[in-house]
Image: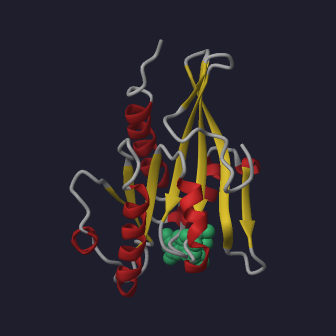
Amino acid sequence: MTACGGPEEEEEGVIIDYGTRTVGLKIVFFGPAMSGKTTAIRWLFMSLDYADKLTSIENTVGRTMFCDFGTIPFPIGNTWTINAHVWSATGQDFYRSTREVVLVGADGVIFMVDSQEHLLDENLASWNELMTLVAEEERPLPVVVCLNKQDLPEAVQEERVRAHLKLPYSVLIFKSIAKDGFNILEAFQHLFRDAMRASVLAQPIS
Ligand SMILES: Nc1nc2c(ncn2[C@@H]2O[C@H](COP(=O)(O)OP(=O)(O)O)[C@@H](O)[C@H]2O)c(=O)[nH]1
Ligand SMILES: [Mg+2]
């Protein structure tokens, strides 16, 4: 894996390496600035004991300047390993072009919504940007939504967000609290399975 913005993956499909018996799956956290992407990824890596495998490129005030990235290996059986390459793109407007780069070769996206009422339109803008960026992809991109910061008083409810963002019912919504890790692993596992199904099973295996 190269530094942010320079993924080694090909643009099409997962990387299956029969030599090392590994499958590479790229999972991207996407969403508006401050919605909890870095918090969720940190929690995920910590809870799976891979905290030292996570790199964040931040600016001087500790906000994600470019992205976070790291790899979590999941052994399947005795011989094969699925390497989940986890990335986040910064949500800040002025780094817009970096998000496009981070999405290249993605096998699945976790979209982090900020549940604060006054941020509904920011969530919408970010969702629309994601839809625009993936519109040209040939293969369908599995997406799950985390309705994050559900601990806050008056956090918006699922139906409100679904209507505002016009989320199709095929997109699953997990109410999450990234700072406590609530529902983060569940959302990740769901997306992981969807991404595996969409990518690996779609590939002819010789
Ligand atoms: N109340 C609350 N705050 C959260 C939650 N998740 C993240 N935060 C806070 O939101 C701010 C932005 O989080 P961060 O992960 O940096 O957002 P990012 O810009 O999407 O990477 C930080 O102060 C986090 O502590 C949550 O579930 N509940
Ligand atoms: Mg961040």
In this view of the protein, which residue sits in the foreground, 13 or 61?
13
Confirm whether residue 16 shows in the render.
yes
- Spot the residue most to the top: 206
Q: Quadrant of the N terminus?
A: top right
As drawn, is 123 to the left or to the right of 71?
left
Picture coordinates of residue 4, whole percent (x, y):
69, 56
Image location (x, y in percent) of residue 7: 66, 47
Q: Name the residue: 38% across, 32% down.
A: 197
**The quarter of the displayed image where residue 113 is located:** bottom left
Residue 175 visible in this rendered orientation of the protein: no
Above or below for 188 versus 199? below
Ligand 2 appears in which quadrant?
bottom right
172 horizontally vs 190: left or right: left
Q: Residue at x 60, y 54 (%)?
A: 87
Q: How many marks?
A: 0
136 in relation to 194, above or below: below
Q: Is residue 203 above or below residue 48?
A: above
- Quick check: 149 left or right of 74? left
Q: Residue at x 38, y 43 (%)?
A: 138
Residue 54 at what x, y percent from top left?
71, 52
Q: Examine the image and state in which quarter residue 152 appears.
A: bottom left
Q: Residue furthest bottom?
A: 118
**Colouring scheme, one of rainbow, by chain, secondary structure, one colour:** secondary structure
Quarter residue 15 falls in: top right
| Spot occupied by residue 74 in the image (x, y as percentages of width and height) | 59, 32
**Residue visible at 52% across and 47% down in the picture:** 27
Is residue 33 positioned above or below 6 on the image? below
